[in-house]
Structures are given as structure tokens and as C-alpha cells.
Image (tube, rainbow, N blue to C red):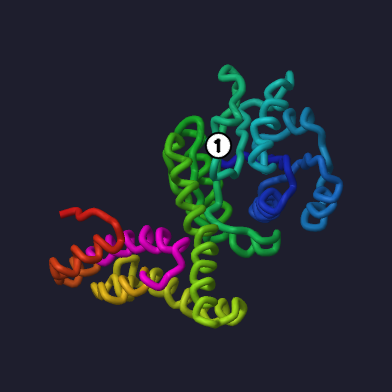
Amino acid sequence: MLKKKFAIIGTGIVGTALAVVLENKGLECIGVNTRSAKSYENFCEYLPKKHLDLAQISLEADLLFITTQDGSISKVAKKLTLLKQRKNAQIWIHCSGSHKSAIMCHDPALQVSYLSIHPLQAFASVENALTLIPGTHFGVEGSDRQSEQYGEQLVSLLGGIPHKIDPEKKTLYHAGAVVASNYLVSLVLMAVKLFEQAGINREDALKSLLPLLHGSYQNIAKDGLARALTGPIARGDTEVVAKHLQEMPPDLQQIYKGLGSLALELGKEKKLVNQTSYSPEALERLEQLLECHSNK
């Protein structure tokens, strides 16, 4: 059964949105703690709650969300650890994708459970987060299986989809999320730069690429990664790939080759699904152009 009383430390976008959703689902936010008067004011526009000191939160909250910036999570947890009194069977929760839940543990003897629930989503505003949290996938890891099971229940209450991750490999999990979100933006910048080389200004380049990006996303969602792959590497068109590299600015060539080698991995998978294969000559040439090694 889910614990009822929670508090928020750090009232940014994620902390505010979580508080609103959890209140709407029947849990009780007893109050918040934040160093910023403006942040507290913004929080109260969505959910008017008392501003409490850490000692009060420690005594009253079953669930304690530390939704500060990543660099402050451990510092806040250390302050909480030094407090003399706290509610029994308390769970401390952070939402960072880069830090393990163990970052909150400063005293192994403390009778507290530690949990991380990381939303795999980019929230631009509180309104945006309130819309996106239902249906969002969450990476879940904690100090023990019981806390992780609680985290899975909590994510389900939020309307999200929980995924148990290995805390020892969490850095790789976070790197994957960064590639899918942040580096997608960087990848679009690379495409825009190539369009600019061809004479299309940046604004028009982006406008023209967005429908292509949307179509690729839809293909991935519908058909999966391998079937969604199109283009010269999927076809085995070595001449086109060679011409790309020949005319491309040198600073973009290595990026193209690295991404191309991953595309070739998918191309092999796609041909296997379709019961075809690259010709030996085309495969060897692609591997040479992309500076990758054959898995044969």
C-alpha cells in the first residue's frame, strides 16, 4: 500500500509537477522546502502548501522527494541525515538519471530507504510536464527490492511505465537517454549545417527537416528500428556514401562515419528480416568507407 504523506525539497518543474499529480491521485503533500522565494511562489500557483524546514519534513513525511538540481541531491541528503529525528520507515526519493539512489546514503545505519525514479522525458515547463507524465517511461532503482517495488507502484500511480535498471550501470542508462534526447538536437544541427552548405538558410533548413524527422519517428514507432532504416546504407549504395564523405566538411565526416556504422548494423538486421543480404563487395566497401569492422 502506498504511503500517503510526502514532501518536496526543490520546487522546480519536476518537483512541482510530481506534487500536483500525486495530490490528484490521493496522496497528501504536507509542504515544501526551497531556497528560492520565486520558486516557492511558482509552486504555490499550482499547489498552495506550507514552506517547512527540513526538521519538520523529516518528522512528518513518509516520502521525501529531493528534486533539486543533481549537484545538490547529496548535500540535501547529508543535511537530512544529520537531523536527530525522522518518521519511521521513511523513503527518500530523487529523480536524477545520472545519480544512483545510493548518493543519498551518508549513514548506512540510518533506518531509511533510498529510491530513484527517473522520468525518460524532457519537460520544458510545469504545464508540459503535467501533460507528459502520464505515459512517460521511468527508470527505477533503489536500495533494496522492497523500495524498488514501491517505486514501481509509485510510477504506476503517476500513470507512467516503470523499468527496473541496474544501479551499477546507471551511467550507461543516462548516456542512452542523453543520446536520444540531447544528441538528437545535435544531429539535427548537423543536418542543418549540411543544408546550409547546399545554400538553404538555417531557418528554412530546419522547417524542411522537421517533417522528415517526424516521418522517421513514426516509422520507428510503427515498424521498429531495422525496418525504419532507409537511405543509401540500407540499400548498399556505396557510391552515394562515398560521395557524401568526399564533399562533406572534414569536421562532420567522423560523426557521419560513426552514425553510418550503426546504420550498417541496422541494415544487416533489416536484410536478414527480409531474407536478403548485402553483396560481399558492397558490404566490404561500406565497412571501408565507414571505418568499421566486419562481424563476419
Q: Position of residue 44 (x, y in %)?
A: 82, 53
* 144 displayed left or right of 113: left
Q: Which residues are magenta?
A: 246-268
Q: Amino acid at mark 1?
A: Leu
**What residue lies at 53% left-to-right and 42% top-to-bottom?**
151
Q: Which residue is mark 1?
A: 115
In the image, 34 versus 5, the foreground residue is: 34
- Is residue 249 part of the magenta span, yes or no? yes
Task: Please tell me whether residue 95 is drawn above or below residue 231 in the rendered image.
Answer: above
**What residue lies at 74% left-to-right and 47% top-to-bottom?**
11
In the image, 127 versus 228, the foreground residue is: 228
**What residue lies at 37% left-to-right and 72% top-to-bottom?**
244
In the image, 155 versus 128, the foreground residue is: 128
Picture quarter containing residue 90? top right
- Quadrant (top left, top right, bottom left, bottom right) of the N terminus: top right
Q: Position of residue 255 (x, y in %)?
A: 42, 60
**What residue lies at 52% left-to-right and 46% top-to-bottom?**
153
